Image (spheres, rainbow, N blue to C red):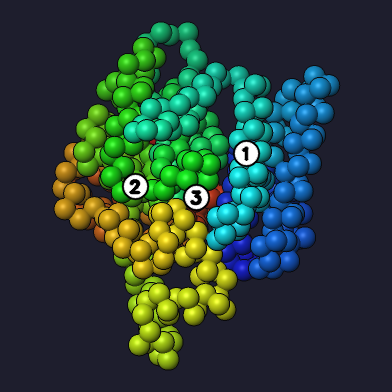
């Protein structure tokens, strides 16, 4: 992985935003300029620099639009969308911070403004689900043929947004697919605006999504594919344990048990800090959080996403996110992706792959091919090429 700024947590999010350059959602020079002005480890400095560039691009986009420079307006709005999302990332250990909703609202607004200049029609949709509606975008491939086409559903991950998933749609459209990106419970605006946390039985979510699209004449009901990246690697796999209308599923990385690596990390603290070995889990972690900002961010943000008030409650809730006793129910073909530099879900993809009883393939992405890191942030086209090569062989 490329080390540009410190600490590693900041660097990972910088790399993530740099990856958006592939789909015109960032500029390398701007991202590096922002990074050079951030005080290492200072989340206020992180927010200030990213929000300044976001505001600048948003204002530029409006100026370009008013002058009739629509292509330039589109690109500036897309960059603003990315920079607003990146800006609030490290504020999420304090969910009540009003800057989170402010930045997310502007990120969404910037993307909606950019949509005005897309060549491909994009529908802003609301998918009925339980007592709410899931926000999403339906990207429709345009062709001279009226034949129904396949569709790829992107179920998102743990901390991304439906706007960030634009890259998934761009790759799908190039290959003759429609694409639907959306936010479910615990994701994007569903969490930050509606305060709805994650649920483990994601098949309920995907069932509602499939119900929403399956009657449309543009969509081939026999070619509905599902992809889940990052935490979506669990969500998508869980969904296809019971939602049988999905023709094939891609997970990157595969996740068998969402709590396993977290619990292993907690257990390692007992060895590292023997003076805390007799403390309760909650007491131990609260003590460590006082001097470890990265740990504090990880735990506080996850408490929010999973609707927990304490760390122990969060861990109890996350234990429900497992495929134990369910993985045997998956019938559709599965592409399980992994990475030599995976650090968040280390070992989970192979465990999932080994227990699958359906048609399956395992792909290990490598730093030596330029695809190192969680979700291959700097190699989105290499990732997509391998995904669609697999789909074409089904």
Residue 154, given in percent of the width and then of the height, sits at 42, 36
Q: Secondary structure at mark 2?
A: loop
Residue 226, given in percent of the width and then of the height, sits at 35, 35
Residue at 24% across, 35% down: 243
Viewer-closest of 202 and 343: 202
Please tell me whether residue 242 is drawn above or below residue 338 in the rendered image.
above
User: Marks 3 and 1, Cα distance to the nearest angstrom?
Assistant: 15 Å
Please tell me whether residue 305 is drawn above or below residue 174 in the rendered image.
below
Q: Are marks 2 and 3 in contact (CB under 8 Å)?
A: no
Viewer-closest of 74 and 356: 74
Say whether residue 323 is visible: yes
Q: Is residue 308 left or right of residue 320?
A: right
Q: Is residue 15 left or right of residue 284?
A: right
Residue at numbered disc 3: 159
Please tell me whether residue 30 is drawn above or below residue 43 in the rendered image.
above
Viewer-closest of 281 and 375: 281
Say whether residue 389 is visible: no
Residue at 74% across, 55% down: 48
Q: Residues within 10 Å of mark 2 (few under 14, many from 20)?
A: many
Q: Nearer the viewer, mark 2 or mark 3?
A: 2
User: Marks 2 and 3, Cα distance to the nearest angstrom?
Assistant: 14 Å
Query: Which disc, if any, is residue 199?
Result: 2
Instruction: Identify the mark nearer the N-term, 1 or 2.
Output: 1
Instruction: Identify the mark nearer the N-term, 3 or 1.
Output: 1
Instruction: Identify the mark nearer the N-term, 2 or 3.
Output: 3
Residue at 53% across, 45% down: 192
Query: Which disc, if any, is residue 379?
Result: none
Query: Which disc, if any, is residue 105?
Result: 1
User: Marks 1 and 2, Cα distance to the nearest angstrom?
Assistant: 24 Å
């Amino acid at each position: 992985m490329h080390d540009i700024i410190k600490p590693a947590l900041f660097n990972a999010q910088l790399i993530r935003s740099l990856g958006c350059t592939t789909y015109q959602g960032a500029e390398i020079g701007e991202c590096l300029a922002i990074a050079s002005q951030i005080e290492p480890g200072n989340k206020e400095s992180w927010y200030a620099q990213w929000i300044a560039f976001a505001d600048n691009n948003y204002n530029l986009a409006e100026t370009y639009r008013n002058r009739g420079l629509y292509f330039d307006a589109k690109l500036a709005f897309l960059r603003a969308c990315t920079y607003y999302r990146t800006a609030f990332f490290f504020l999420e250990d304090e969910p009540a911070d009003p800057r989170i909703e402010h930045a997310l609202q502007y990120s969404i607004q910037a993307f909606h403004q950019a949509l005005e200049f897309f060549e491909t029609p994009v529908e802003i949709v609301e998918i009925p689900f339980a007592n709410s509606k899931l926000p999403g975008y339906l990207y429709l491939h345009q062709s001279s043929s009226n034949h129904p086409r396949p569709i790829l559903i992107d179920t998102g991950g743990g901390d991304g947004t439906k706007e960030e998933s634009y890259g998934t749609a761009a790759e799908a459209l190039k290959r003759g697919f429609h694409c639907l990106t959306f936010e479910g419970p615990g994701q994007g605006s569903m969490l930050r605006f509606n305060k709805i946390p994650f649920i483990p039985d994601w098949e309920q979510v995907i069932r509602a999504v499939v119900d929403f699209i399956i009657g449309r004449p543009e969509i081939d009901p026999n070619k509905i594919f599902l992809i889940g990246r990052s935490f979506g690697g669990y969500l998508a796999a869980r969904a296809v344990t019971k939602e049988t209308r999905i023709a094939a599923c891609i997970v990157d990385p595969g996740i068998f048990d969402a709590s396993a690596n977290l619990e292993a990390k907690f257990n390692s603290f007992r060895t590292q800090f023997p003076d805390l070995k007799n403390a309760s889990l909650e007491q131990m972690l609260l003590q460590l959080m006082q001097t470890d900002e990265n740990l504090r961010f990880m735990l506080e943000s996850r408490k929010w996403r999973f609707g927990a008030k304490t760390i122990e409650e969060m861990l109890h809730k996350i234990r429900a996110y497992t495929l134990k006793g369910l993985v045997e129910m998956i019938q559709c073909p599965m592409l399980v992706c992994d990475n030599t530099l995976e650090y968040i879900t280390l070992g989970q993809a192979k465990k999932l792959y080994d227990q699958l009883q359906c048609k399956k393939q395992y792909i290990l992405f490598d730093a030596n091919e330029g695809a190192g890191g969680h979700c291959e942030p700097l190699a989105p086209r290499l990732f997509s090429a391998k995904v669609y090569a697999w789909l074409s062989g089904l």
